[in-house]
Amino acid sequence: MSMKPGKPIAILLLVLVLLGCGAMQEEAGEGGQVMSGASEAEGIRQPVAPPLTLAELGRKYPETFIFHGPQNVRAVALTFDDAPDDTFTPMVLDALKEAGVQATFFVVGERVEKYPDVMRRIVQEGHVVGNHSYNHANLPTLSEAAFRSQITRTDELIRQYTGYIPSYIRPPYGNINEPQLQWIASQKRKVVNWNVDSLDWRNLPRDEVVANILAGVKPGAIILQHSGGGVGADLRGTAEAIPIVVSQLKEQGYRFETIPRLLGDF
Ligand SMILES: [Zn+2]
C-alpha cells in the first residue's frame, strides 16, 4: 500500500491535537464522567476546527468563565455540587454550621423539586445557591433550546427560594461550549468551575478528601466537593472533611468566602 508522504504527518498531527483535547477535558472532569469519545470521533470525520477546550474557553472569556478567585488574597471558597439530597446535604450543612463557614451550593433543579425542605435550609443558613442544570445533563450535547431550558427551569426554581435568579452557573462535569458560554455572558452571569478537586465523588474516606483539598489549595482557590450523589454514593467523607479542612486552612491564614464574596461580585 502506498501513501503520499504528507499523509502520515497529517494523521500524526491530528492524533496529537485530539490527545491534547482529551487531556484538558479529563483534567476538568467532574463526577468521574469525562466527556465520552463521541466528540473525538466527530473530530476525526470533521478535523477542520475542533471546538475550544475548557481551558481555552477560560482564556478567551476570562470575565465569564471562572476557575478561581483573585490569587493575591488568602481566601478560598468551598463549593458543593449536586445538592440537595436528604442524606449528605444535611450532613454538610451541619458541618458548615459547626465550623461557622458559608459556602456555595450548585443545585440540580429536579432535586430542588424533590427536596424542598433541604433547599430551604441551604438558603436559610446563608449559603449561596448556583445553578447546576435541571437534570445534570452534559450541556454541550444538547440543542440550544434544550440547553436554555436546563438553565431557565432551574433559575425559576431557585428564584422561588432565594427571590432572585442566580448569577452563577456550574455546568455538570464542568462541560460547556462556546455558544452556551456566550449566551451566559450576554446575561452578565458567570460560569464557575473550580481549580481544586477533592475527588470526593469517588466515595473517598475523610482523610483522602482532606489530603486532596490541602494539596491543591492556594490563594483564590475554588474547591469542588459534592453534597448529593447518585445511587450508591457515600459522601460521608465530604462532610467529615469539613472541620479539618477549615481548621487547617484557618491556621494557614485563609478565610472562607462564598463565590460572590471571593470574586468581589456582591
Ligand atoms: Zn454535578
Image (cartoon, helix red, strand yellow):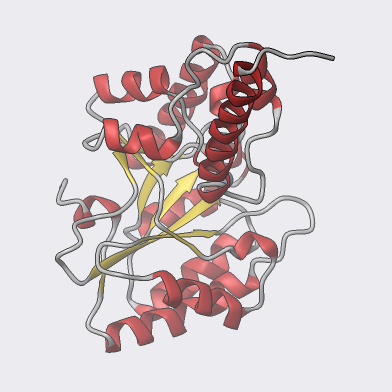
Residue 134 seen in the current view: no
Who's the residue at 56% across and 74% down the image? 209
Question: Could you tell whether 34 is left or right of 139 in the image?
Answer: right
Which quadrant would residue 204 be assigned to in this image? bottom right
State which quadrant residue 22 falls in: top right
Query: On the image, which quarter does residue 74 sit in?
Result: bottom left
Determine whether 67 is above or below 227 in the image.
above
The residue closer to the viewer here, 124 or 149, is 149
Task: Give percent across and percent down for residue 154.
Answer: 47, 30
Q: Residue at x 42, y 70 (%)?
A: 216
Evaluate whether residue 170 shows in this view.
yes
Q: Position of residue 130 (x, y in %)?
A: 39, 43
Residue at 54 percent across and 32 percent down: it is: 17
5 over 128 or under it: above or below: above
Residue 129 percent across, percent down from the top left? 38, 47
Residue sitting at 69 percent across and 67 percent down? Answer: 203
Give the image location of residue 73, x and y in percent. Answer: 16, 67
Q: Quadrant of ligand 1?
A: top right
**In the shown orientation, is residue 145 left or right of residue 191?**
right
Q: Quadrant of the N terminus?
A: top right
